[in-house]
Amino acid sequence: MKDYTLNRGDEIRVIAPSASLKEKLSPSNKRAIKRLEKLGYKITFSKNCHKKDEFLSTAKAKDRAEDINTAIKDKNVKAILAAKGGWSSNDLLTLIDWQALKENKKPIIGFSDITALLNASYKMTKIINILGPTFSTIGKNADYKYTINSLNALLTSEETITIQKSKNTYEYHEDPRKTPSYKVIRHGKAEGILLGGNIGTFFLLQGTKFQPDFNKPFIFAFEDDNESGKYTFYESIRKLESLLQLPGFKDNLAGLIIGRYQKSTRISKNKVEKMINDKIEKDIPILYGLDFGHTLPLLSLPIGGKVRIDTSDYHKYLTINL
């Protein structure tokens, strides 16, 4: 069960644990503020979320850590929303006051590079975090209501949520196309704690004290981006194999959900099935093509929360139990 329920009037603090915001009041950022305020939230920004260095368009680690620790300790802040993705949120893991977060329970929200923070936070505090949109993503015009409604359901609901696919899917700077149906690669039923996210970022936790334990049944969310270029498919195979070699991973993996690959990767369902069949022998339910990852609009999922897969019911492939 999650440790928080947000209400109208609650404050959400935007911080930049990875890439910084270019400008506070760009048209996209104005839209994001307006959409979140329409849900009833008060939006504030951290002191250093616009700072940049000469390398990664981000502030120094100590400044970013100061922002997140300030948000953690501020009693008025009820949720922490990442401004954008990027490459460097794992810089902060040794600088975050995890004990303070245990005492001031609030979710961290984001995807891509923010995967490191979400899973590390669950490991260190057992707080359920949200694999969902960043502040920047909320300002996009691609079926934004699906994105914010999915996020708001996780922030406010205390009931079971049934996942529904989006009507249309987009990639950045491309026209919309009808969202394909979620695909069943292997049928079955499973229930467990959800872990994972962007697999390249999740890898940064390996061998550290921030990597979640795989000592009880869990469902893993797996998505990869196009950073590997034409070798993305082979990189995904290697990453999946490395996961399966982690202590407890193979034995306690109860189910797998796979996000939508970017069009530029040219990875088809057939390729994904080949990867799965080559690497996973267990008879577990596996879903492919869900609305998370580097795609728009974005589904929100609870890292550390209990989810259930049931492929026998097309309308309830995936449910979240809050």
Image (cartoon, rainbow, N blue to C red):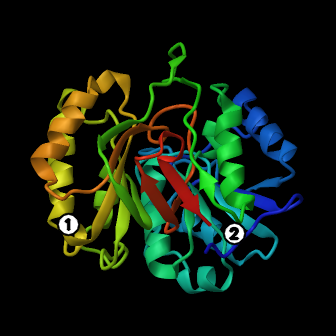
Would residue 305 be found to the left or right of residue 293 on screen? Answer: right
Q: Is residue 89 above or below residue 36?
A: below
> Could you say which is closer to the camera, residue 263 or residue 215?
215
> Could you say which is closer to the camera, residue 164 or residue 42?
164
First in sequence: mark 2 vs mark 1: 2
Residue 106 figure quarter: bottom right
Question: Label 2 amino acid?
Answer: Ala
Q: Which residue is mark 1?
A: 250
**Can I make out residue 63 in this image?**
yes
Q: How many marks?
A: 2
Q: Position of residue 256 (x, y in %)?
A: 33, 53
Q: Position of residue 60 (x, y in %)?
A: 50, 59
Residue 234 figure quarter: top left
Q: Which mark is residue 1?
A: none
Dot 1 lies on which element?
Answer: helix
Q: Position of residue 89 (x, y in %)?
A: 45, 58
Question: Label 1 amino acid?
Answer: Lys
Tell me the quadrant of the picture where the C terminus can be found. Answer: bottom right
Q: Position of residue 305 (x, y in %)?
A: 52, 67
